[in-house]
Image: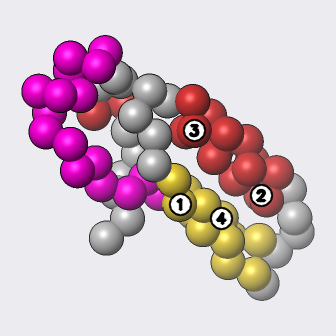
Amino acid sequence: MVKINVIFHSIHGHIYKMAEAIAEGAREVEGAEVGIYQVPETMPKEVIEKMGAIDEKNFLPISL
């Protein structure tokens, strides 16, 4: 078995879509255990809202 973690940062969701595509491909490998994690955002919520970025409720669990 091989473990693969896809770790990404995405504000508007574009990189999230790419990371999910990578994870989807990795899941096709027999015996692969795939995790996908978003790193924490460091910008203040007010700045993210002004940028029109995706709501944090649409984000995946954060890797700590």
Q: How far apart are marks 4 and 1 (CA)?
A: 11 Å
* Badge 3 element: helix
The residue positioned 57% from the left and 38% from the top of the image is 15
Q: Distance between the residues labelled 3 and 4?
A: 17 Å
- The residue singled out by tag 4 in the image is 34
Q: Do the residues labelled 2 and 3 touch (CB within 8 Å)?
A: no
Based on the picture, tell me whether residue 38 belongs to the magenta stretch: yes
Quarter of the C terminus within the rendering: bottom left
Q: How many labels were placed on the picture?
A: 4
Residue 60 percent location from the top left of the image: 41, 45
- The residue singled out by tag 2 in the image is 27
Looking at the image, tell me whether mark 2 or mark 3 is earlier in sequence order.
3
The residue positioned 44% from the left and 27% from the top of the image is 12
Report the amino acid beneath label 2: Arg
The one nearer the camera, 14 or 62, is: 14
- The residue singled out by tag 1 in the image is 7
Q: Is 13 on the left-hand or right-hand side of 17?
A: left
Report the amino acid beneath label 1: Ile
Looking at the image, tell me whether mark 1 or mark 2 is earlier in sequence order.
1
- The residue singled out by tag 3 in the image is 15
